[in-house]
Amino acid sequence: MIALLLFLAVEAHPVPDAGTGADADMPEPDPDAAALGDAGPVPPDGGVRDTLPMGTLRGRVLAKGTRTPVFAAAITVDQNPAGESDVDGKFETTAACGLRRIAIQAPAFETAEVAHDACADPAPLIVRLAPLENAPVYETVVTAQPPQPALTIVGQELTKTPGSLGDPFRTIESLPGVATVAWPLPIYAIRGANPGNTGFVLDDLRVPALFHLALGPSVIHPYFFDELSFYPGGYPARYGRYVAGLVSAQTRQPGSDMVHASVDVRLYDTGGLVSVPLPGGNGAVVAAARYSFTGPLISMVSPGFSLSYWDYQIRADRNLGRLHLTLLALGSEDALTYTGGTAPYGVLMRFHRVSLRAHIPVGNGQVIAQLAAGYDHSKAPIVNLNQLSMAAQAYSVMPRLAYRRPTKWVDWEAGFDGELQWLAPISSVEQVGDSDLGRKRTARLFAGYASATIRAGSRLLLTPEVRVDSYAISGVERADVGPRLGVRVLLEPMTWIEVRGGRFSQPPSLTLQIPGAENFGLALYGLQTSWQASLGAGTKRLRGVEIELTGYVQRYLLTDLRDPTVSWPDPLASDFLVRRDARSYGAELLIRRPASERLHGWLAYTISQNQRALGGGVIGPSDWDQRHILNLVLGYRLGRNTFGGRAHLNTGRPVLIQGSDAENFVRLPTYYQIDLRAERRFLFDRFALDVYLEMVNCTFSRQIFDLGQNTSGQIVEDSHRIVLPSLGVHGEF
């Protein structure tokens, strides 16, 4: 709170007003406007213009329903060009006195015409342009772009992909290389690694927990995002400490022109977002929050259980001359309790993050400095539900400094990032053994990196990178050097091939990420590492279609559960985890039709094999080994109505069954589901409403998530059938 007050107290530098004055309602178009006015049309140069009295015509062009300024809208007065709107949608020109026909036209919008006399009514015009019926209202970019092969999602489709329940992070379920461990839980295994080996960062700030418990959404408000980039492998050197993929999200810079707000009401929760400009127009503050209704709903379905969650996000931007400051604060809490048994138990996950980032031009480049602090707290049962639980908390400080400079042939970046963490488990359990997961400990993680994007001619792009990581946990130190290289060759302007490779490292980790339960076991397990390589080819030669095929191979050293068949293992035991060699290889196909088309979407298919060295020369499949994964996402735009659907299919992952005679792997059955979504947008002058209905798993498919064996040797299935309807309203102004 002190940081926020100091941030807002900085003296602002006023920005000159564009001179539009107070808002005025748009006059109704007059069908007889062409016949009005004594002088008739005004010639563009000379003539009558020199003898008639003139007035000043001011106005502003906004997108109807959103109050978003329309840039470069063409203004004509009596069919004569009179200029364009600026980046704020404002325009100013002269017009002869008398009622004139003013026409405003912009790409992707309907033309608006009004009749106005600038001399009789000097008040500024406010003109709202309605989007064309068949113009795209959002856009998705799902394409590999240098310097790293990211799949990037932008625009409103962050919240409108069928099957995602309006959640941007859930969209990655439909992308290549992603295996969903047990739908609908948002637990993802990327290219055969454990879910805990994939990182999630927001504005270069690590997020310790991505989703709320059970069926909850992500811990970030969906309209707080600006874009999301997914790296299934080979992420940039400015990120580190994960051996698999990485998801990088950027928050939306708040508008400094006026107050903006949105409200969301769904069956599961309600939330809102408000953006307010700072005095002087040199910045703005945006705040978002959400609260769930899932507690009463779950209590109705499962008596004895109670679940609640909340989250918040705040971003403030301020310009101080050439210096741009960004303050970001976010937090989340989940509480799951069970009181139906003889001994109640609960799960609690809570975290807070705050960061201050500065951008300032230096020379021909830019310096980016960031300082962040965090607090994590988690509580969960161990050994079994009715006896023991463990709580842990952690405090952290995370500095980051980088310098970026583009040149004619080379764009380069160099910097460092670090994390100081103090972990203090709170437990009545006296730990024995060599594991330090349940002990107080300190972690110091630092790294330096350098990367360059070299344009070697018009058809060759090279991206050499190196990252040097230093780890110190509980007094044990390790270091790792991670070289990385990318090569992109254009065979012709619309066709390319791409080669990527590199080394990555990470401290020991649990299978799933838990706030406060991290950075442990360096002496016992050593570093997790991976070597990754990929070869891809793509083309845009087919009209309206982009195709890309990527083959990859990855070698890992991972910390795995020693015995995945134990129902409630003790995470404090020294043999809870084991160090294993692993490998993963496969191919990913992406066929995409851009969102600018009325029929748009993509098809993503992954075929892979993921293996673990189980000891004694035995090689078995990974717990997350789904050989075939297919996702077909389609949307069809009809005016202001959008209809979409997703078809998903995956073959079953292996389950280790302990029988009376031996252990053996048995694969779960193939699972499929179809999700449907329909939406209607209603536009008003000053606000817009989106009403949508989504049905996830409308095929009522039953998913088998585990197998066991009874005393008679018969296979017993654990399964569920979950159908998630979502009816909601999103309003924004």
Image (tube, rainbow, N blue to C red):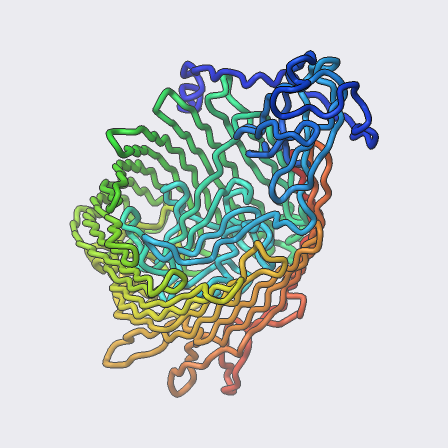
Residue at (36% x, 63% y) in the render: 492
Displayed quadrant of residue 495: bottom left
Number of numbered tags placed on the structure image:
0
Q: Observer-nearest residue: 337 or 506?
A: 506
189 displayed left or right of 706: left
Q: Observer-nearest residue: 520 or 242?
A: 242
706 displayed left or right of 320: right
Displayed quadrant of residue 36: top right
Residue at (30% x, 34% y) in the render: 368
Quadrant into which the N terminus falls:
top left
Q: Tell me if I can see residue 443 in this picture.
A: no
Q: Tell me if I can see residue 80 in this picture.
A: yes
User: Where does residue 439 sit, x and y in percent of width and height?
Assistant: 28, 47
Residue at (50% x, 26% y) in the render: 284
Q: Observer-nearest residue: 222 or 151?
A: 151
Quadrant into which the C terminus falls:
top right
Displayed quadrant of residue 635: bottom right
Is residue 449 shown above or below 571?
above
User: Where does residue 601 sit, x and y in percent of width and height?
Assistant: 56, 61
Is residue 666 shown above or below 634?
below
Is residue 654 shown above or below 388?
below
User: Where does residue 506 sit, x and y in percent of width and height?
Assistant: 27, 55
Most distant residue in the front direction: 47
User: Where does residue 154 sit, x and y in percent of width and height?
Assistant: 50, 48
21 displayed left or right of 524: right
